[in-house]
Amino acid sequence: MTADSALAEDCARHIAAAFADYNAEFRAITRRAPQRFDARDWKGSQRDAVERIELYDRWVDRAIAEMRLKLGHRAHDRDLWRTIRAHFSDQIDALPDREFTKTYFSSITRRLYGTVGVAPEIEFVAADLDPLASVTSEVVTNTYLNRGSLPLLFEDLLGDLRFHSPWKDFDRSVGHVAAEVAAHLATLGERRTLTRLDMIRPVFYQMTRAFLVGRITGRGFTVPLVIALKNTESGIHVDAVMLAEADVSIVFGFTRSYFHVDLDRVGEAVVFLKSLLPKKPVSELFTVLGRAKQGKTERFRELLRHMEQTTDRFVHAPGERGLVMVCFTLPSFDVVFKVIRDRFPYPKTVLREEVLAKYAYVFRHDRAGRLVDAQEFKRLRIPRARFAPELLEELATETAGTVHFEGDDVILDHLYIERRMTPLNLYLRTASPAQAELAVLDYGQAIRDLAYTNIFAGDLLLKNFGVTRHGRVIFYDYDELCQVTDCRFRELPQASNEEDEMRAESWFYVADHDVFPETFINFLAFDDAQRAAFVRVHGEILTAAFWRAVQQRHADGELMEVLPYHMHRVRVAGSL
């Protein structure tokens, strides 16, 4: 073996060991979740979520520093890194979830070299790589056979759980699950016998809830099954039972915090979940299981594969043009691309650094089902021919600090990629009156949910909210976002004369963090019926008293829950 080959093998072994250490720490944090749930230590759960999110970058930066030290002046020797990559590929071939390890390697080389586009000789990003191709085994499940009684079946399931906390009313929880399953199957017109349950053995944890995840199998049918558990001072009980694909999809959605579930082989769980949620992209399943970097890698691969199979062009995203971002989309691909403008016109006063900080804040924050998960990408290379001329012109004139051109390619130094939704203002124009009212009411609920997680959207215009395929209203424009506790919510002063009332500008002093909730309704493009529905259900949002009360609850340390399942299920379970 030559000296170079020995050095490359040693470096490859070092990087593989570094990933193993990162993964061990990732799983150690994840394994705290059962204890947090048992102790009802929700603040601890929040700290764990942030710590685990920040872990990857810390380990990548450490590995880069170690490689620089080990390689010295040869740290950028491309031929050497080709050899390191080859040795690395051989060393990890038998590892479970080896795509994770490859992504870690690619993260190191991309940051080390500042790679633009793709460098296949020193990273692992080929579009034809399938992260599930190497999954030949099934996720470990507990199987329960129907012995002729649904209550007995679910008694077996719930009885196998091992929490230190007692059950509040075990029999009632069993009866609740059995009744929900029977009712759901009846609504499907399903008369065939339910034969078995297959439940993923590890419990899934997300903030204040534990989830049992699996499927119901009958003679000729399969139905997803997700059971939410709540731990109260008087014990654990079943809080909700979800069996519809749409409900389960929301629980595993792109607007929620990542699950903490200790899986030996994550790919096996993704295969299982994909069978329950066939419309859910693999990238989102990896992400929601906490493997955000792998989810990002898979989204990039999905984009590359899609572009190889299509010819449509990137165009401006539907909706009003943003003052802070240039937003564009590939019509045949279900995401939006967002690039920060070089300059923000009046009335925007936010700085680029502040926008970046707000997106980073959202990444670490509890998104509570109301904030889209924006993935940050750097140095993408896309053929110029795939862009519509009018979009190219705007990128060239408005984002020259971030976007530039090399030959036939467009180089995007920095951008965010999000799931595409229908802007709420556009949705309301074409929705039926009934659909529009539901969206307006969910818009109000979104504002409440954000407030309960200490988020004030800042700019409440309808164009900054989107509607998902499940009809949920999500906030996606973060440049004005701030914490509720940082605002000063004030009543609108009464004018003392007609001259004051007629002035275009405020006749009273307004500080930077002053907010006047009474004025919100003036900026919302509702018709009369929509406005009446909003005021009827969410009128208190238009009062400073509501916001000050929420501020006080945050100051008191109260953790206000925002659940990933429909409220009618909460009320059903709440009687337990």
Image (tube, rainbow, N blue to C red):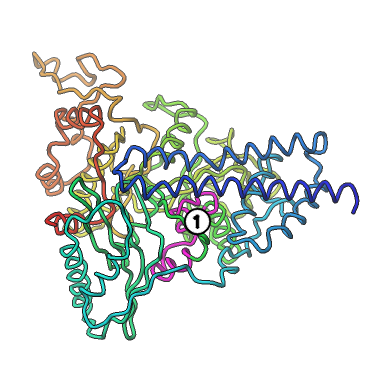
Residue at x-position 89% and y-position 47% = 3
Q: Position of residue 164 (x, y in %)?
A: 30, 52
Q: Which region of the structure is painted magenta?
A: 269-295
In this view of the protein, which residue sits in the foreground, 446 or 460?
A: 446
Q: Is residue 244 left or right of residue 306?
A: left
Q: Could you say whether the residue bearing mark 1 is in a helix, strand or loop?
A: loop
Q: Is residue 12 above or below residue 143?
A: above
Q: Position of residue 128 (x, y in %)?
A: 63, 65
Residue at x-position 63% and y-position 37% = 61
Q: Position of residue 9 (x, y in %)?
A: 79, 51
Q: Confirm whether the magenta stretch covers residue 277.
A: yes
Residue position for label 1: 330
**Prevailing secondary structure of the magenta residues:** helix
Q: Confirm whether the magenta stretch covers residue 109.
A: no
Q: Is residue 359 left or right of residue 156?
A: right
> How many numbered marks, from 0 up?
1
In this view of the protein, which residue sits in the foreground, 558 or 513?
A: 558
Q: Amino acid at mark 1?
A: Leu
Q: Quadrant of residue 243?
A: bottom left
Q: If the image is split into quadrants, where does the C terminus sit?
A: bottom left
Residue at x-position 78% and y-position 47% = 10
Q: Is residue 477 left or right of residue 549?
A: right
Q: Is residue 515 above or below residue 538?
A: above
